[in-house]
Image (spheres, rainbow, N blue to C red):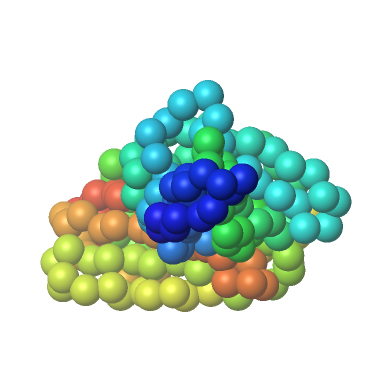
Amino acid sequence: MWNNAQVKGENRNLYCTTIDMPHVSYISPYYGEVNTTTYMRGNNFDIKDASSKVEFYNTTTGVKTNAVIKSWTDTYISVTVPSISLGYYTVSVLNVNGQSNPVNFRIIRKPTVSITSPSVGAIVSSLGFTFKGKAQGMTSIKKEDVCVGVYDYARKKWTAYNAPVTSYDPLTKVWQYNVTADKITPNYRADLRVTAKDSEGFTTSKNTYVRVSSPPPAI
């Protein structure tokens, strides 16, 4: 804004300039594991240069960590979540004009789940078979926190859906589910899924498929 002022008998034009500070509208997702990707939308991020940073600030310890920038435009930034401890953080954008408003972010660790049997594409008995693997990183040891699904291609539906596993050993972390004959159809494919869930609702799933053998000959 221009303004005329009298200074020591001289007319001088005085003006002020507005600095466009970076502003973050939102971050998505607002939680995640280390080495995953999150992105921010906003404005005035400007052109990426040596001053451009995305900073994760631990609200408990006060430690600041810069993220690796994957892409940067004036309105969009994506970064790799840095290798930092679990907990709550604020995330800010920094550029030559200053630091943006902070937005909240949480570092989490999801459960891990694996399938050890049957192998992908294996031929299984039409009389039934054992579906098993390992589940770790759960905050509880209830077998209800490991669920399975069986999709039968002959009937084109889930014959088991979010069914608790038959057993779960908290020491070995091994889960097991007995797939019975009524859940599969001979000579058809069946898809299998297992999902591990922790007490806060974070889940991890694994999928595989099998081929069901012909029914045994009648005696």
Measured from the top left, where is residue 32 in percent x and y? 55, 53
Q: Which of 90 and 143 is in front in this view?
A: 90
Quadrant of residue 51 within the rendered picture: top right
Q: Answer above or below: position of 207 versus 182.
A: above
Q: Which of 46 and 193 is in front in this view?
A: 46
Residue at 63% from the left image edge and 36% from the top image edge: 66
Residue at 29% from the left image edge and 49% from the top image edge: 210
Residue at 16% from the left image edge and 55% from the top image edge: 187
Q: Is residue 23 left or right of residue 71?
A: right
Image quarter (top left, top right, bottom left or bottom right) of the N terminus:
bottom left
Quadrant of residue 190 within the rendered picture: bottom left
Quadrant of residue 198 within the rendered picture: bottom right
Measured from the top left, where is residue 188 in percent x and y? 17, 57
Q: Nearer the viewer, residue 96 or 183?
A: 96
Measured from the top left, where is residue 213 in percent x and y? 24, 51
The answer to whether residue 115 is seen in the rendering is no
Q: In this view, does 76 lie to the left or right of 113?
A: left
The answer to whether residue 103 is seen in the rendering is yes
Residue at 25% from the left image edge and 54% from the top image edge: 212
Direction right: furthest residue: 61
Measured from the top left, where is residue 163 in percent x and y? 47, 75
Direction top: furthest residue: 50
Image quarter (top left, top right, bottom left or bottom right) of the C terminus:
bottom left
